[in-house]
Image: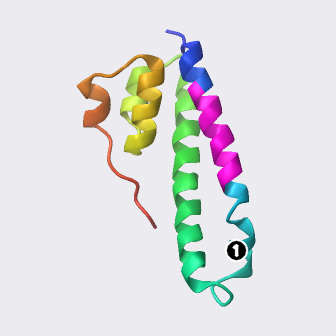
Amino acid sequence: MFASAALLTAISTELDDLRRHIDAPAPVVAAGVATAPTRFMTDAQRLDVMNQTLEAIAALTGDLAQGRDPDASIARMTLADLAQRLARASGSRGPDIARSVVDVELF
């Protein structure tokens, strides 16, 4: 089974969005807690979510590269919002996708 062009486009979009988000908090995180404690924690959490997203997309891409079923790979994702976006792109809207996902875990 091959991944659809829509799914690959969605993956590409997610990676591009992730890249743009990584650039935003980098200066604050580098400055550390002493210069902006509240914003530091918010940005650190944002980086954690981005890391989890990147990990999920990398796993999906690896599965697709090995010829695994895209719907089954998406169903194994632990990021609900990402799984739902990619499921829509792949044409899967069934309960199997939504049943296996959970919310983002911060730290």
Which residue is located at x 39 percent, y 33 percent? Answer: 84
Where does the image place residue 96, in percent across and percent down from the top left? 27, 27
Left or right side of 92 for 29? right
| Kind of residue indicated by mark 1 | Val
Q: Nearer the viewer, residue 68 or 14?
A: 14
54 w.r.t. 34: above or below: above
Where does the image place residue 55, in percent across and percent down from the top left? 55, 46
Q: Nearer the viewer, residue 60 or 102?
A: 102
Where does the image place residue 89, in percent across and percent down from the top left? 48, 22
Which residue is located at x 70 percent, y 74 percent? Answer: 28
Find the residue positioned furthest to the top: 1
> Can residue 44 be seen?
yes
Left or right side of 72 for 86? right
Left or right side of 81 for 41? right
> Can residue 69 be seen?
no
Answer whether residue 30 is magenta in the image: no
Crowding around mark 1 (Cα neighbors within 10 Å: few <14, some 14 to 19, many 20+) is some
Find the residue positioned furthest to the bottom: 34
Q: Which residues are magenta?
A: 10-21
106 w.r.t. 98: above or below: below
Which residue is located at x 24 percent, y 27 percent? Answer: 95
Which residue is located at x 32 percent, y 29 percent? Answer: 97
Q: Badge 1 is on which residue?
A: 28
Residue 57, quarter of the rendered image:
top right
